[in-house]
Amino acid sequence: MNQFLAFLLRILIAIPVSTSVWLISYFTFAQSFWLAGGIGLVVGAFAYGLTGMILKHRFLKRHQLKRKEYQYIKKNIDEAKPKIARLHKALFSIRHIPSLKQRMELMRTTRKIYRLTKKEPKRFYKAEPFYFSHLDSAVELSEKYVFLSTQPKKTFELDQSLYETRRTLEELTVLVEEDLYKVISDDIDQLNFEIDVAKHTIKSLKDSRIIDESRRLR
């Protein structure tokens, strides 16, 4: 649900309703200016709230979710947002040039998973390993790497730890990419189905043309 568009729609409904009620109360029912204004505000607030309830109900119905399910999903997605911001900040701070491409891919993939699950909350269930495990591990490792890499004195043990951290982040990148694949797996299956249907239709048309052509040649 696009929060800004939902808010804009609620405002566009509430303001005209409030204004209309105020005008009717003031001119038709001869209420005082302030009383009519108060009535208009109350009715406008009611219209604003009612519109929000209708929009949320339609949103939940479209995504086949119950209210408690959505609250659970939204809570976890909202908690993940600052974690993703921390992860991206840490990955940007790493000065290891050879791993730049891998880090950019990790940022792109985490952002993609977040946006998909925010837009279509039911996808969250396919992304649970990302939200409950892989994201936390990536944040912890990347921030620890940034901290250790800024130490003024480098030792063999420190360099080894940094190397192992980079390797683990690479492995986590693969896992996060697999998380994304799981999130979009239904779309891939649907696309493959549509491709099969299209191929079958094309083959049927070709066979039909061949039969028609052979009949003409007889």
Image (cartoon, rainbow, N blue to C red):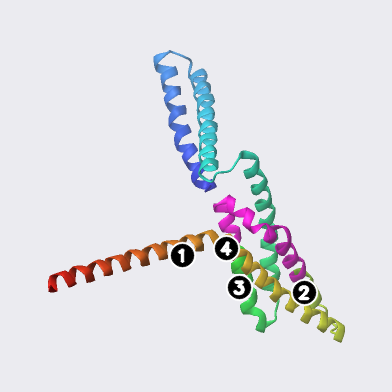
> SS of the residue at dot 1?
helix
Label 4 and label 1: CA atoms lie apart by 22 Å
Query: Which residue was labeled with disc 3?
Result: 105
Using the rendered view, name the quadrant where residue 204 is placed: bottom left
Label 3 and label 1: CA atoms lie apart by 26 Å
Question: Where 164 falls versus 133 (above or below)?
Answer: below
Question: Is the residue under label 3 in contact with that under label 4 (CB below 8 Å)?
Answer: no
Label 1 and label 2: CA atoms lie apart by 41 Å
Chain-order first, disc 2 or disc 4: 4
- Does residue 197 appear anywhere in the picture? yes
In the displayed structure, does residue 15 sit left or right of residue 172? left
Inspect the image, locate mark 2, and give the three-letter code of the amino acid beneath it: Tyr
Query: Which residue was labeled with disc 2?
Result: 145
Name the mark nearer the viewer: 4 or 1: 1
- Closest to the observer: 145 or 23? 145
> SS of the residue at dot 2?
helix
Rendering coords of residue 110 (x, y %): 62, 64
Chain-order first, disc 4 or disc 3: 3
Question: Is the residue under label 1 in contact with that under label 4 (CB below 8 Å)?
Answer: no
Name the mark nearer the viewer: 3 or 1: 1
Inspect the image, locate mark 4, and give the three-letter code of the amino acid beneath it: Lys
Rendering coords of residue 144 (x, y %): 79, 71
Question: Within the magenta stretch, is there residue 117?
Answer: yes
Residue at position x 47%, y 27% in the image: 18
- Closest to the observer: 166 or 186? 186
Inspect the image, locate mark 1, and give the three-letter code of the amino acid beneath it: Asn
Q: Which residues are magenta?
A: 113-142
Residue at position x 71%, y 69% in the image: 90
Name the mark nearer the viewer: 3 or 2: 3
Label 4 and label 3: CA atoms lie apart by 10 Å
